Image (spheres, coloured by chain):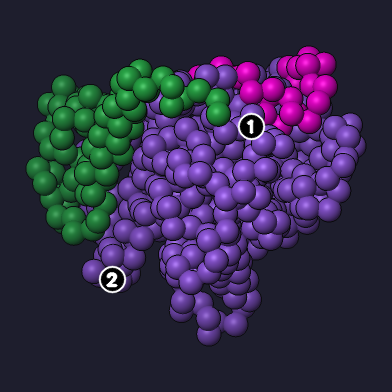
Chain colours: A purple, B green
Amino acid sequence: MPEMGIIIEGIIIVIWILLIIGLGIYSKKYIKSSGEFMVGGRAIPVWMLGFWSAGASVSAWAFFGLPGAIYAFGPWQHWALCIPMMAGFPITVLFLGRWMRIAAKKYDLMTMPDFLAAVYGGKLIRIFAAIGIVIGCVFYATAQFKALGILLSTILGIPYVAGAAIGIAISAIYIIIGGFIAGAIINVLNVSMMILASLIAVALGYIWTGGFANMYATIAMASGGVSWTNQDVAAGGAAWSLWISWAFFLSSFGLAGQPQIVQKLYGIKKPSTLWLWGLLGAIVFGITCPAYCYLGVVTKYLTVTGQAPNIVAVYGSPDYVIAWLTVYKLGAEAPVLGGLLIAGVIAAAWSTVDGFVMMGGAALARDIVNKCFRPNWTDKQLLRALRIGMLIVGVLMVIETMFPAELITWLAAIGWAQFAATLTPALLLATTWKGITKWGGTAGVLVGLVVSAGLTLLYRIPMGTVRFLKMFYLDAGAWGMILGFITIVIVSLVTKKERGPLYYDIHGIAPPQPVQQTITQK
Amino acid sequence: MLDILLLGEYAILIIIDWLRGIQGWGLPGFGLPGTPWTSTWFLIYITEWLCWFIIPIVTMLWWRSWAKKHPELLEEI
């Protein structure tokens, strides 16, 4: 056991954690209102938000979960899940970004339900969207906590639950002291570390495997290698390819419904710089995520050549691929690089998890309670409620983390699918179709929410009989997203043409008299 | 294939292979030993070309020039 290497790795990790928490404490003094807490007073430079959004999309899912899933199930997931998310950034700018940003001040937009309520009108759409966000936040953040738990338990040689508890405790300090401003500054550091870690990973992987071509050729010629490289087609032939195209659609267009990524658009200082957010987000994601996919293939190579144990057989889960690689392989051969890579994993988890806790808390405190039932709260009351909301969501995340029924990549898939199904159809149609109505949007969000959450629940019940419905958890979101689009169109066509005030701004139509009065009052 | 020559880590790794005298595109059975692949994994080259190069770079540069032509559409309402 490379004990000295693990000590060196531990020192690097402790320095990194102290640096991040110190920065969080320093930036806390700048947060005086809920607006600064949630959207940084709309004065964050675009490049900072581009970095943060990319970091939120990569997360520990890509650094930890995806390499494990590729190690276990084959490399097709790289093109089906990782790469299309790059396209999601520019897609979001093209369809949503301008209106989200230029309408933000007039309608006091801070969350995604704010935008939906301003376009479609009514309280129900806000409540349904907020419920979907809370569900998505819990699962997505659990994936991050689980990654931290596995990593810390491997380094410290302690059980998973103890490792997860330490990871959650450190993360809680980091989240509670900061907010949006702290998040933006810290995440530039976090994402820089992720980029550095990914470049180190690629260089090391190339050296270990003797080259890109040699790596794949060796795997393909090893026992079971052909089925691993061809696992996708072997699993379902043409039907699989068709289905996986659906995942491709959900990964790209579905990004527009991810609040942890898209909500940051409200914080951009100059609306004319939105293009840079789209470009930076895509490029940072495109550098980091494929590098982590590569690590999954590298570890597979190490296993088939006898340089690594069979991770699934030894540890019982492919989630341990990166933990083994960083702690045992690098801990023995290059502990400084191992420490930087582990810091990269922590950075990836933290760049996302703060956003989820904040988002879930805001969905409960602001979108449901404040906006629908307690509209007269002062800013101080709202800020206090936001922190309580974050605590409630945090407790749900802790419960799910302590009972990790799923692989990291599937936990993240549940969260991604829930967001995409609940929010994407209503958001994309809000700016692109004049025919939307209040009840169309409300019904579409409800259908997306119920279908995705319902199928996810069915998949988790160990009945066996319903499991034939799924390939993996993105199925639930794909069904929810498609049915959400269809529902909005059908219900909008047959219901009264009521809409929210922002609808009339977007489509350049004169609002009817009552709506006109609402706009004037704003 | 242009983008994989310029962007993406996998493209760089393939180029390093070439510089070391190892031919091919990293696909077993295509200039390399091993059973030819029939999987959808090869689609990575197409998706990288679309998602790394065409969609982000081309569309965002187009959006930037559109924004310069219509600054009034990017003012707070």
Q: Give coordinates of residue B51: x percent, y percent.
A: 31, 39
User: Circle 2 sits on which residue?
Assistant: A239
User: How many residues crowd mark 1 within 10 Å: few (<14), some (14–19), many (20+)?
Assistant: few
**Which of A383/A76 is in front?**
A383
Q: Is residue A517 left or right of residue A242?
A: right
Q: Nearer the viewer, residue A2 or B27?
A: B27
**Residue under mark 1: which chain is it in?**
A
Q: Tell me: residue B59, above or below residue A448.
A: above
Q: How many marks?
A: 2
Q: Is residue A494 above or below residue A45?
A: below
- In the image, B67 versus A255, the foreground residue is B67
Depth check, mark 1 against mark 2: the one in front is 1
Q: Quadrant of the C terminus of chain A?
A: top right
Residue denoted by label 1: A106
A488 or A336: nearer the viewer: A488
Q: From this viewpoint, is residue A307 visible?
A: no
Q: Is residue A29 magenta?
A: yes
Q: Residue at x 24, y 56 (%)?
A: B40
Tell me the CA gap for discs 1 and 2: 48 Å
The three-letter code of the residue at mark 1 reads: Lys
| Callout 2: SS | helix
Residue A469 screen position, x and y as percent: 46, 76
> From where the camera sits, is residue A44 visible?
yes
Q: Quadrant of residue A458?
A: bottom right
Compared to residue A83, the image places residue A348 above or below, namely above
